Amino acid sequence: MYSATDLRLEAQEALERVWFVQSLEETERTDPTLSLRLHIRPNLFVQAFWGELTGSLYLALIEGGRRIFGIDRDAGEWHLHPYDDPDKHEALPEGLEPKPLLKFLARVEDLLLQYELL
């Protein structure tokens, strides 16, 4: 079962290994939740939220305060918020296990390069 510790360790690994992640910030920590930001550039970051009670994991690429891409696991089901329509939900049956944050960042890298977001 994925945990707050797993998310924190993955985020630390990303900070050390993923070329576009500039810094890591813990924005909220309670017993059942953890929220992190992986900063890419001013006004562009990945928000990661984990909730123990529901087993939820929310991963979003945020630009200018708005989600522009995301993948979530809610109630055990994965879904995608595509770059061209981030309010849409598309089933993602393959999910992102076993390292969801790092797999999400690989998709973010593709978007950063494809849409010249850096």
Image (cartoon, rainbow, N blue to C red):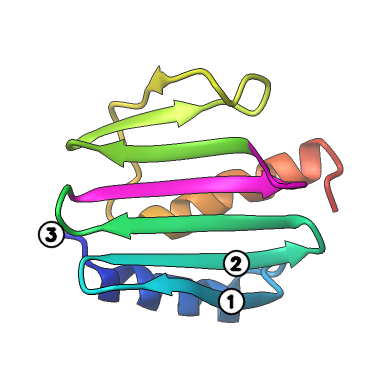
Q: Where is residue 52 shown, x and y percent of the image?
A: 18, 59
- Dot 2 or dot 3, earlier in sequence: 3
Secondary structure beneath disc 2? Answer: strand
Q: Position of residue 3 (x, y in %)?
A: 22, 66
Gap between marks 2 and 1 measured at Cα: 5 Å
The residues bearing labels 2 and 3 have C-alpha atoms spaced at a distance of 23 Å
Residue to which mark 1 is pinned: 24
Q: Amino acid at mark 2?
A: Leu
Is there a contact, CB below 8 Å, between mark 1 and mark 3?
A: no
Query: Badge 3 is on which residue?
Result: 1
Q: Residue at x 44, y 20 (%)?
A: 89
* Boundaries of the magenta span: 55-67
**Given this view, does label 2 or label 3 mark the residue nearer the observer?**
2
Is 25 drawn above or below residue 32 in the view shown?
A: below
Q: Sequence order check: which comes first, mark 1 or mark 3? A: 3
Q: Specify the principal SS of the magenta part.
A: strand
Quarter of the figure with residue 23: bottom right
Q: Which residue is mark 2?
A: 38
| Amino acid marked by disc 1 | Leu
Residue 49's x, y, as percent?
Answer: 40, 57
Side of 30 relative to 79 (left or right): left
50 lies left or right of 102? left
In space, the residues marked 1 and 3 are separated at their CA atoms by 23 Å
- Front residue of 118 and 54: 54
Marks 2,1: beta carbons within 8 A: yes
Lower sequence index among marks 2 and 1: 1
